[in-house]
Image: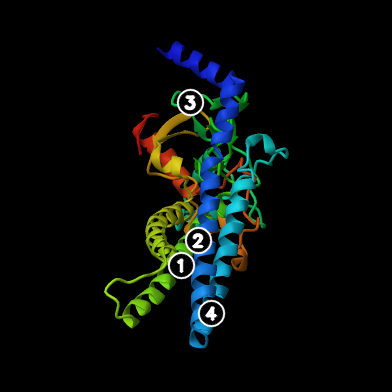
C-alpha cells in the first residue's frame, strides 16, 4: 500500500498538466479574498459614506462620513499592506542561510541568574563542568539579539538527525517540508491557502499583523454600518424598511469575520508569546541532549520559550513603534534559535535522574 501511494505521489508531482492546474487553482482563494475586500470597499466607501452620509445627510452626516473614511482607509491600508507582504515574502528556507554561526558557551552564573536559580560555592566546579558539557551547543543571542551559536537538538525518535530527502538537506530545528511549496520552510507554522504561501520565519510577523488588522477592519465596518441602519430604521414610519442590501451584507459578513478572526488572532498571539508554531503546538518533539546523544521526548517543555518579552521581540522586533507596521525587523536567521537554558538543563536532569532516554517530560 505504501509503495502504491509513493508511486501515485511521484506520478502526481511529475505530471506537468496536473501541477500547472493545481498551481492555478491555488490562486482562487487569493482572488476570492481580494474580490471580497474590493466589494467591501465599494459598499462602505461609496454606498454608505459618500452616497448616504456625505450626500444625503450633509452637515452632521458629513462629519461622521469623513471620520469614517479616515479611520477606514487607515485600517484598509494596514490590512492590505500586511496581506501583500505576507503573500509575497518568502517564509524562509534553510538554503537561504549562508553564514555559519559560531559556537559559544554560556557562563554558569549568567544562565543561573536568567533562570532565577543560585549555585552553592561548594559544588561550583562540578556544576561548571556538567553545565559546560550540557550547553556546548546552546544557541544564545548577541548584544543585537541575533543568534551567535549553531546547534541542532531536534532529532528523530532513534536519535538520528532529521533529513529532508526531497530537498536533500539536513533539517534544522523547527524546519518542516511543505508539499505545496515543495521546499523546506524555516519555523514553519502552516501553509495558508488564503495567501497561497507558507507562514514561516520571515513572514510570520506580516501574517500576524494581517490577522490583527483584518479583525479590526471587519469589526469596524460591521459596527459603523449598523449604527446608520438603526438610526434610519428609527426615523422611518414604513412597515417595511427599504435599506441597501450592501449594508446588510456588510453588517453580517463583517460580524462573522470579526468573530472568527478574533479567535485566530488570539491563538497566534499566544503562539508568539510562547515561541511556538501551530505545528509545534500539536506535535511531540524528540530532543537530543548531552554529548552522549541521549534522546528524550517532550510535548509540554518548550525549549525555545525564552520569556514572553524576548519571544515577542524575536517576531515583532525590538523597536515598539514598528511592532504593528508590516516592515522587516524580526531577529534570527531562521536556522539557529535561542534556547531556554534552564529548561534545557531540566531536560538533561530528567534524563540523568531517570536513566531513561525515552522518558516523556
Q: CA distance from mark 4 to mark 1?
A: 19 Å
Q: Dividing the image into 4 quarters, which one contains the N terminus? A: top left
- Percent across and percent down for residue 329 are 65, 57
Label 3 with label 2: CB-CB less than 8 Å: no
- C-beta proximity under 8 Å, tags 2 and 1: yes
Image depth: mark 3 or mark 2 in front: 2
Of the pair 195 and 269, the residue shown nearer to us? 195
Per the image, the residue denoted by label 1 is: 221
Q: In the depicted view, which residue is nearer to us: 59 or 174?
A: 59
Circle 4/circle 2 CB separation < 8 Å: no
Q: Residue furthest left?
A: 239
In front of the other: label 1 or label 3?
1
Residue receiving disc 2 = 40
Residue 75 appears in the rendering: yes
**Which quarter of the picture shows residue 96?**
top right
Q: Secondary structure at mark 2?
A: helix
Q: Where residue 55 is drawn, which disc sits there?
A: 4
Q: CA distance from mark 4 to mark 2?
A: 19 Å
Which tag, 4 or 2, sits closer to the chain's start? 2
SS for dot 4: helix
Q: Mark 4 or mark 1, which is nearer to you?
A: 4
For disc 4, the neighbor class at 10 Å (few under 14, some 14 to 19, many from 20) is some
User: Residue 344: image x %, image y %?
Assistant: 47, 43
Q: Residue at x 68, y 41 (%)?
A: 101
Q: Which residue is mark 3?
A: 159
How far apart in space, not on screen, are marks 4 and 3 (Cα)?
A: 71 Å
Q: Earlier in the sequence, mark 3 or mark 2?
A: 2
Amino acid at each position: 500500500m505504501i509503495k502504491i501511494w509513493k508511486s501515485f505521489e511521484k506520478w502526481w508531482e511529475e505530471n506537468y498538466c496536473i501541477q500547472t492546474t493545481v498551481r492555478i487553482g491555488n490562486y482562487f482563494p487569493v482572488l476570492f479574498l481580494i474580490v471580497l475586500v474590493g466589494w467591501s470597499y465599494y459598499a462602505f466607501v461609496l454606498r454608505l459614506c459618500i452616497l448616504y452620509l456625505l450626500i444625503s445627510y450633509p452637515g452632521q452626516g458629513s462629519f461622521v462620513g469623513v471620520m469614517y473614511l479616515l479611520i477606514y482607509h487607515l485600517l484598509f491600508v494596514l490590512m492590505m499592506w500586511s496581506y501583500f507582504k505576507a503573500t509575497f515574502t518568502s517564509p524562509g528556507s534553510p538554503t537561504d542561510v549562508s553564514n555559519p554561526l559560531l559556537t559559544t558557551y554560556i557562563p554558569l552564573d549568567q544562565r543561573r541568574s536568567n533562570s532565577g536559580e543560585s549555585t552553592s560555592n561548594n559544588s561550583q566546579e562540578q556544576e561548571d563542568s556538567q553545565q559546560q558539557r550540557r550547553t556546548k551547543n546552546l544557541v544564545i543571542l548577541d548584544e543585537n539579539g541575533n543568534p551567535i551559536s549553531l546547534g541542532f537538538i531536534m532529532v528523530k525518535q532513534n536519535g538520528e538527525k532529521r533529513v529532508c530527502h526531497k530537498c536533500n538537506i539536513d533539517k534544522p530545528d523547527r524546519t518542516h517540508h511543505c508539499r505545496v511549496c515543495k521546499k523546506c520552510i524555516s519555523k514553519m507554522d502552516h501553509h495558508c491557502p488564503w495567501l497561497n504561501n507558507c507562514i514561516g520565519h520571515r513572514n510570520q510577523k506580516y501574517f500576524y499583523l494581517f490577522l490583527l488588522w483584518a479583525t479590526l477592519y471587519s469589526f469596524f465596518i460591521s459596527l459603523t454600518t449598523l449604527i446608520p441602519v438603526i438610526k434610519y430604521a428609527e426615523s422611518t414610519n414604513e412597515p417595511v424598511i427599504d435599506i441597501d442590501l450592501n449594508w446588510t451584507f456588510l453588517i453580517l459578513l463583517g460580524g462573522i469575520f470579526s468573530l472568527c478572526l478574533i479567535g485566530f488572532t488570539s491563538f497566534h498571539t499566544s503562539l508568539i508569546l510562547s515561541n511556538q508554531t501551530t505545528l509545534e503546538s500539536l506535535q511531540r518533539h524528540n530532543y537530543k541532549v548531552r554529548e552522549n546523544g541521549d534522546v528524550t521526548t517532550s510535548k509540554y517543555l518548550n525549549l525555545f520559550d525564552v520569556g514572553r518579552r524576548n519571544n515577542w521581540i524575536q517576531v515583532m522586533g525590538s523597536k515598539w513603534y514598528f511592532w504593528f507596521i508590516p516592515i522587516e525587523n524580526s531577529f534570527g536567521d531562521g536556522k539557529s534559535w535561542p534556547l531556554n537554558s534552564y529548561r534545557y538543563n531540566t531536560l538533561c536532569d530528567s534524563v540523568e535522574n531517570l536513566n531513561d532516554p525515552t522518558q516523556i517530560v
